[in-house]
């Protein structure tokens, strides 16, 4: 029987037996297949192993030898060279020797004497394959361990760098917020002064031409737009800086919705828009009254801005399981898929435009989202393009007290 090992470099096998004839027979029978080393005692085998253990894949030993038995040899081999596979040769009657070899020497296989060459070769080849697998697994383990150590070092280094960058970003963000506050306030002051001067000029309006009156109206309109933008930038800056003090407590959402919508009735009437309100009675949620009012104001204001003349806006509260859903539903142009993706982003201008020439900063919905989330709520929008939009603000329903 030919071994697959003949096609590669010969693996090394150490054969140990105190009978010289057995040593000669083993070498003669296997020297073409394996690089065969022989020893006539356990002590000689250990000496050979000390010099050649890195080359040796398998040790085969007779059990019955003077001074040191095969089991005693394998106990030492297991301790010194655990990867090397161990095969013991024993007689049919030596049951206790076999048990000892398995328990103490942790042998790979035991072979009864006299051995059959082909059967022994199959056993040796299997042992060599097991040895190669153990060595490869150990190599892979150490490679993986080394890679993990390097990865851990990289992670530590990267984490440290990210911490430094995060601290720098926090510092820069603070400086940015401070600068925005200064710039916005400094812009707001001269705009107010200009608006005040315009109001003084109006005392002499009867002397102005129609063109001059139109210019004054345009100037005041521009001032109003800029003041609205500055106010929203300051609102967003305050939200991100967490400078606002929330007073979240059980509030009557029914009352807040009704009162909030009343403020827009006059504005809606100018565009012949009807606002229908169904808010129920005494429905409570944990909110900050000021924040909730600003959220409602922004959403109802948007509904009025983007609704064509003669349409309706429906504001209603739905109880859904343990939640209160506040709906602001309009009959405006609705949202296309691209609009939906950037709906709550900052400075995002959507495809829809105000229907009465109103101004839009592109900041309102991002502020709404931040305020709602700060009150532990959610805001979503359901819309079909061309069929209006339904903005839904959701809070957990609570008891009055």
Image (cartoon, rainbow, N blue to C red):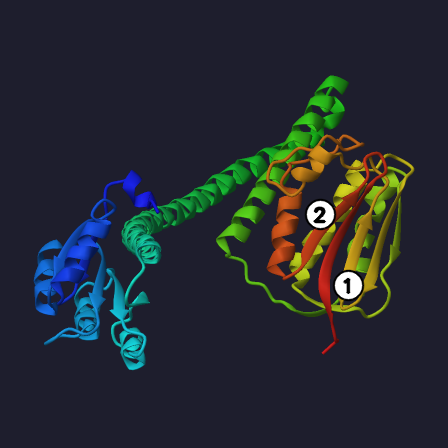
- Residue beneath label 1, please? 324
Q: Which x, y percent locates residue 6?
A: 28, 41
* Camera-nearest residue between 163 and 354: 163
Is residue 341 shown above or below 371? above
The answer to whether residue 92 is left or right of residue 187 is: left
Is residue 226 shown above or below 33? above
Tag 1's secondary structure?
strand
Q: Which x, y percent locates residue 225?
A: 65, 34
Tag 2's secondary structure?
helix
* Camera-nearest residue between 54 and 87: 87
The answer to whether residue 6 is left or right of residue 76 is: right
- Residue beneath label 2, please? 298
Judge whether residue 256 can be spotted in this image: no
Q: Quadrant of residue 363?
A: top right
| Dot 2 or dot 1, earlier in sequence | 2
Q: Which x, y percent locates residue 189?
A: 53, 40
The answer to whether residue 105 is left or right of residue 206 is: left
* Camera-nearest residue between 345 and 142: 142
Image quadrant where one finds the C terminus: bottom right
Q: CA distance from mark 2 to mark 1?
A: 19 Å
Mark 2: few, some, or many residues within 10 Å (few <14, many ≥20)?
Answer: some
């Amino acid at each position: 029987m030919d071994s697959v090992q003949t096609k590669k470099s010969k693996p090394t096998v150490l054969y140990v037996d105190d009978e010289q004839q057995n040593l000669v027979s083993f070498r003669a029978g296997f020297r073409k297949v394996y690089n065969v080393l022989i020893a006539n005692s356990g002590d000689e085998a250990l000496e050979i192993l000390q010099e050649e253990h890195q080359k040796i894949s398998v040790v085969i030993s007779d059990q019955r030898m003077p001074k040191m038995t095969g089991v005693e040899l394998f106990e030492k081999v297991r301790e010194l060279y655990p990867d090397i596979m161990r095969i013991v040769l024993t007689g049919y009657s030596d049951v206790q020797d076999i048990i000892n070899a398995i328990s103490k020497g942790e042998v790979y296989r035991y072979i009864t004497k006299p051995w059959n060459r082909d059967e022994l070769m199959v056993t040796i080849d299997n042992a060599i394959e097991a040895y190669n697998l153990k060595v490869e697994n150990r190599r892979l383990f150490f490679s993986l361990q080394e890679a993990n150590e390097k990865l851990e070092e990289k992670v530590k280094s990267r984490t440290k760098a990210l911490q430094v960058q995060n601290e720098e970003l926090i510092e820069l963000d603070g400086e940015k917020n401070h600068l925005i506050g200064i710039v916005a306030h400094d812009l707001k002051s001269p705009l107010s002064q200009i608006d005040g001067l315009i109001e003084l000029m109006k005392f002499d309006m009867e002397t102005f031409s129609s063109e001059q009156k139109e210019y004054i109206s345009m100037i005041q309109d521009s001032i109003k737009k800029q003041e609205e933008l500055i106010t929203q930038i300051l609102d967003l800056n305050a939200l991100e800086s967490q400078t606002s003090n929330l007073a979240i407590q059980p509030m009557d959402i029914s009352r807040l919705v009704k009162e909030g919508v009343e403020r827009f009735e006059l504005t809606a009437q100018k565009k012949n828009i009807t606002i229908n309100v169904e808010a129920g009675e005494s429905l409570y949620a944990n909110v900050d009254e000021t924040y909730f009012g600003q959220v409602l104001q922004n959403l109802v204001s948007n509904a009025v801005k983007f609704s064509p003349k003669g349409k309706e806006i429906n504001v209603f509260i739905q109880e859904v399981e343990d939640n209160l859903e506040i709906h602001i539903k309009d009959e405006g142009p609705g949202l296309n898929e691209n609009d939906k993706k950037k709906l709550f982003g900052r400075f995002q201008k959507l495809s829809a435009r105000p229907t009465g020439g109103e101004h839009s900063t592109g900041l309102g919905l991002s502020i709404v989202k931040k305020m709602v989330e700060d009150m532990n709520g959610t805001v979503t929008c359901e819309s079909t393009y061309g069929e209006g939009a339904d903005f839904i603000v959701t809070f957990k329903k609570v008891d009055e007290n």
